[in-house]
Image (tube, grey):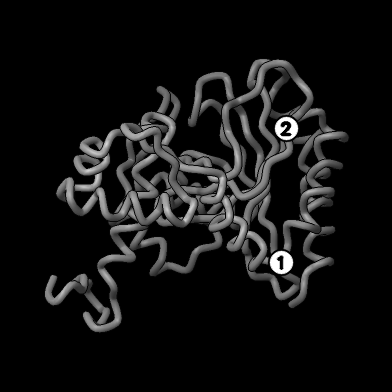
Amino acid sequence: MANGVIDEPGQPRSELVQSLSRGLAIIRAFDSTAPSMTLSQVAARTNVSRAVARRFLHTLAHDGYVSTDGKYFRLTPRVLDLGFAYLSSLNIWDVAQPIMQEVVSSTGESCSASVLDGTEIVYVARVAAGRIMQVGLGIGSRLPAFCSSMGRVLLAAAPPEQLDSFFRAVVLKPCTPRTLTGETALRIEFAKVAKQGWAMVDEELETGLRSLSVPIRRRSGQVIAAMNISCHAGSCPAEETLAKCLPVLVGAADKIARSLPN
């Protein structure tokens, strides 16, 4: 780092702005485990001095992205504007949301859509089934890609160099005793998913949870997202979930694709 600019491999230092990077790091420091923090806690989480953290937090508060009671800081709903800007740029979610609602109505199961971000998937749309108990997921939630059905669909469509980079970066930590963690086994699984056009994960991400996913494509064939249904693994055999839900998901993904530009 020099002259207020971040050093990053492959990027000219003159093109990178440290202050922007730090501001985004401050926003990302808040999560479900730390929804509100003191100045000292923010500084510790982002590895900056208290003085630097103070300047960024007060700037974010001035712009409406952070609120404070004088001691604790927390994000405001305005942060959602950043995510919605991304969603609107994809130009598919106005189309996808009602179609996902049709999936929920047809299957009785929650329906979600996600995109790949590094080694994780990020939820960008979700329609929950009308039940009292719900998995605590929403737009912006992140899950490990390697053991989630949507992640496997997205990784199955990734070019070889991206997949190689993924395996160099990912930590293949099991989430349940059933989680597939070997790189060779996962590469075989991704190839299988690519060939069959869908992925099912049965209690690998969470005990008792089964999910079934298909890709969302542009009419050109490019995979731009994944869509899934999730259900309780004990509610019926996996074969029944596949027979009941796969045709609905495939039909919904095709319907979204026909509504998108090439």
Mark 1, secondary structure of its residue:
loop
Q: Is residue 215 above or below residue 162?
A: above
Answer few, some or many: residues within 10 Å of disc 2's Cα (few below 14, many 20 plus, some between 14 and 19). some
Residue under the point 34% across and 62% down: 165
Amino acid at the residue labelled 2: Ala
Answer few, some or many: residues within 10 Å of disc 1's Cα (few below 14, many 20 plus, some between 14 and 19). few
Residue 179 lies in quadrant = top left
Q: Is residue 37 above or below residue 158?
A: above
| Relative side of 73 to 48, left or right | right
Residue under the point 39% across and 49% down: 27
Pointer 1 residue: 91
6 vs 97, nearest the viewer: 6
Q: Quadrant of the N terminus?
A: bottom left
260 vs 251, nearest the viewer: 260
Q: Is residue 73 above or below residue 119?
A: above
Q: Position of residue 8 (x, y in %)?
A: 22, 72
162 vs 260, nearest the viewer: 260
| Relative side of 20 to 250, left or right | left
How many marks are shown on the rendered structure? 2
Mark 2, secondary structure of its residue:
loop
Residue 10 lies in quadrant = bottom left
Pointer 2 residue: 128
Residue under the point 60% across and 38% down: 138
Evaluate whether residue 159 shows in this view: yes
Q: Position of residue 39 (x, y in %)?
A: 25, 39
Residue under the point 63% across and 52% down: 226
**Number of the label disc, if any, that sits on residue 221:** none
Q: Earlier in the sequence, mark 2 or mark 1?
A: 1
Q: Is residue 121 above or below residue 109?
A: below
